[in-house]
Image (cartoon, rainbow, N blue to C red):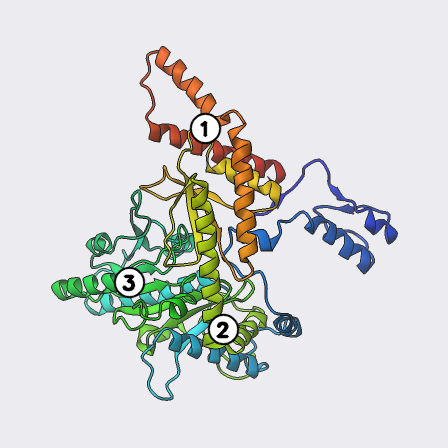
Amino acid sequence: MVLSKTASQSDVSIHSTFASRYVRNSLPRFKMPENSIPKEAAFQIINDELMLDGNPRLNLASFVTTWMEPECDKLIMDSINKNYVDMDEYPVTTELQNRCVNMIAHLFNAPLGDGEAAVGVGTVGSSEAIMLAGLAFKRKWQNKRKAEGKPYDKPNIVTGANVQVCWEKFARYFEVELKEVKLSEGYYVMDPVKAVEMVDENTICVAAILGSTLNGEFEDVKLLNNLLIEKNKETGWDTPIHVDAASGGFIAPFLYPELEWDFRLPLVKSINVSGHKYGLVYAGIGWVIWRSKEDLPEELIFHINYLGADQPTFTLNFSKGSSQVIAQYYQLIRLGYEGYRNVMENCHENALVLKQGLEKTGRFNIVSKDDGVPLVAFSLKDNKHHDEFEVSDMLRRFGWIVPAYTMPADAQHIIVLRVVIREDFSRTLAERLVIDIQKVLHELDTLPARVRAKLAIAGEADAQNGNVKKTDIETQREVMAYWKKYVSERKSNKNKIC
């Protein structure tokens, strides 16, 4: 959910030149119109406004799939009117969901016996999947503490400061303390040693990230598992691991099959993955898989019969479309292991092309790793005159949406640009992006240093007044604060809160 916002306070009606072929009256912008309008007019009015959205193919900020084959598009449209939760009415859709769960469980090396069904569920995305996994850990920890006659009111989760915001949401919404391992310059993922040191008797799990949003790096789940085994032996605890494989779960099995991060490690009890990222499905599908039935407390599962037959359900959402589940099954059987490997290898190769192109400019430090999610995160070697926020802003002129952001604590003085390489980002586009970045850098070089010049003047004035001169890091933080304010003001001018 996004808070309701408005784009304008003065213009309270919608006008469309093309729609005047069908209707001459303008429409109220924030109230339902009194009368109906022709379907052609409704389509044209909406279509006109949507032209101002960014091009999804050029949105290099997003991990989410923006292209699928026409055959899958047709399956999606044919099933868009099916409610996924109506399992008795749509038994084939339910069967396809179960097949997906089992395929993904086998991909993650779940310890399943012959004929044994995997334990998992399809979700709206990894955010819901993480909420469900977190609730299972919390309830299992509480049950154990109650049985031992110990307090169970202060659960916590240990993560790195690089976790996605959905972990913060889980902690806040479900009253679990989030203990974050701080980052450091040059090391932008959770340190397993520090993470295990933070574990205590109230830790319901340690969350490891297979593919950090910040730089695509895989955290060392195997080392975390080994260290945690030793700590559990010393303390008598049984602290488990959850792997947030939202981005990397559909990459590691195909590019790095020997990497041990999944259910091959005994303390990994659940894994989530986003089907709508490198699962190659449009937005709206995620998966969470449990190691065994014992890792999902039965009391969290609801049984309903008011849609026909008895239906077990463990979701935060109730009604949702069936299309993305069907699309996921299509991709799994259409591509198979070979097809997914080909796609991931191609994405990896295109990431290397982009990385090499950026390195040849001599202007950037590469922050991402070659092994991990196929993305390139990079920062300017010299941002004293112009910084990454300016590069990001100017790239919009060419249609590119490249995010600039600051790292979390304690590396928040580092600014990074990031390009996510998806299936529809070709080598040609990678080469074109480098050319456009070079144009932006050339143009910036010919411009006066806007922000830093102002700060330098202000710094000199402070020095003349006897104040202490700011350090480089303090100046960097002021620049970031300026750009955050600048971006916020630009958004607020376009989107006034209703």
Residue 303 visible in this rendered orientation of the protein: no
* Mark closer to the observer (3, 1): 1
Give the image location of residue 156, x and y in percent.
Answer: 28, 56
Give the image location of residue 410, x and y in percent.
Answer: 31, 41
482 sits to left or right of 13: left
* Residue depicted at 56% across the width and 64% down the height: 282
Mark 3 / mark 1, whichever is N-terminal: 3
Mark 2 / mark 3, whichever is N-terminal: 3
Mark 2 / mark 1, whichever is N-terminal: 2
Secondary structure at numbered mark 1: loop
| Crowd class of label 3 (few under 14; some 14 to 19; many from 20; radius 10 Å) | many
Q: Which residue is mark 2?
A: 339
Q: Which residue is mark 1?
A: 385
Judged from this view, the residue extending furthest toward the front is 360
Q: Amino acid at mark 2?
A: Gly
Q: Amino acid at mark 1?
A: His
Give the image location of residue 474, x and y in percent.
Answer: 35, 29
Q: Which residue is mark 3?
A: 221
- Asked whether 389 or 346 is in front, the reply is 346
| Crowd class of label 2 (few under 14; some 14 to 19; many from 20; radius 10 Å) | some
* Residue depicted at 45% across the width and 73% down the height: 121
What is the number of the mark on residue 467?
Answer: none
Task: Classify 212 as above or below 447.
Answer: below
Please report contact status of discs 3 and 1: CB closer than 8 Å, yes or no: no
